[in-house]
Amino acid sequence: MKVSIIGGGAIGLLVAYFLKINRKEPVIYTRSAEQAEELVKFGLTYKNLQGVKSNVRVEAKPIEEFSGNEPVCIISVKQTAIKDLKWLEDYKEISYLFLQNGISHLSFIDKLPHKQVCVGVVEHGAVKENHSTVHHLGEGRIKLASYRGDSHYEWKSLLNSNTSPVNLEEEWETMVYEKLIMNASINPLSAILRITNGELLTNEHAFSIMKKLYEEAVTVLNLIDRREDLWKELLILCRNTSLNRSSMLKSVESGQQTEIDSITGEIIKRGISLKIDTPYSRFVYEAVKALDWRG
């Protein structure tokens, strides 16, 4: 079965590899023709945590050649690129799975006419080393929930494996908000301090700020009843992806615009609407926006 993947970043390449080892045929649609050409020529190279490589052949095309031929499609671009995908609504029979940080993409999904839309969160750590190589720096899970329809069952069968276990969640909202808490606690701080996820645990000052960001996010998202459990999950996530450099840090380092608005920006907006002060979130937001402006 062919599965289209829009986005040739770290998550897009990692998911393409998972599909391939599950005997599916990913078709990767990339922003640049150069990346598509390299993937076709050299194949997709996967590196595990120990640096052991595996190469698989994949089909890849520039995004301009997307024609909706594949019945199911994964959207793995960053939030900053979602606004350029309005044309997705033209392919009404396709089943979509959205894999993004933050929550800004939800308003985009609301405007789609499709009956089958699934959302997911990726807990793996990965970095794209070049156009055709992805380094898997931390094993985790993919969580899926139906936004509309019941396609989450099909997506689980497509993606689930020993390398990448898939969990089905009953409530998409809880799933997405819990991941937003993780992103809001980790990503902006790692981007400002230029440190890995693991260093957030070993640097006592970074750890203290991360805890403050976490408390603000849990409060404004009304998940106080899960404060202790989610904090434990956050610590486990940092340990499991200890070598990973967050996507926001990688954006800062490469001079690209970050996803700060769809992550910390959403925490601040909800705090304002609920009259809850979020001073630590406001500070890291302004700091990352300064880095965006500089880039």
Image: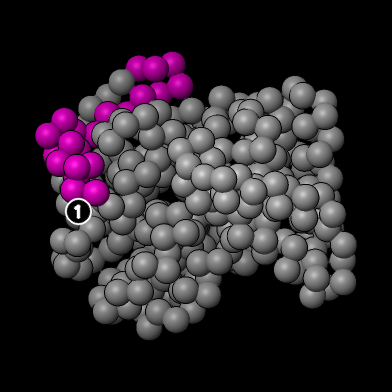
Q: Position of residue 6 (x, y in %)?
A: 31, 56
Pinpoint residue 93: horizontal percent, then vertical percent.
Answer: 26, 76
What's under tag 1, amino acid-wise? Pro
Magenta segment = 32-52
The x, y position of residue 23, in whole percent, is 23, 42
Q: Is residue 16 visible?
A: yes
Q: Is residue 113 above or below residue 276?
A: below
Indicate the secondary structure of the residue bearing disc 1. strand
Looking at the rendering, in which quadrant would you find the N terminus?
bottom left
Residue 116 percent coordinates (x, y)? 38, 74
In-front residue for pair 98/129: 129
Determine which residue is flagged by label 1: 62
Protein image colouring = one colour
What is the quadrant of residue 240 in the picture?
top right
The image quarter containing residue 252 is top right
Establish if 131 lies above or below 159.
above
Neighbourhood count class around disc 1 (C-alpha, 10 Å): few under 14, some 14–19, many 20 upward = some
Q: Nearer the viewer, residue 122 or 171?
A: 122
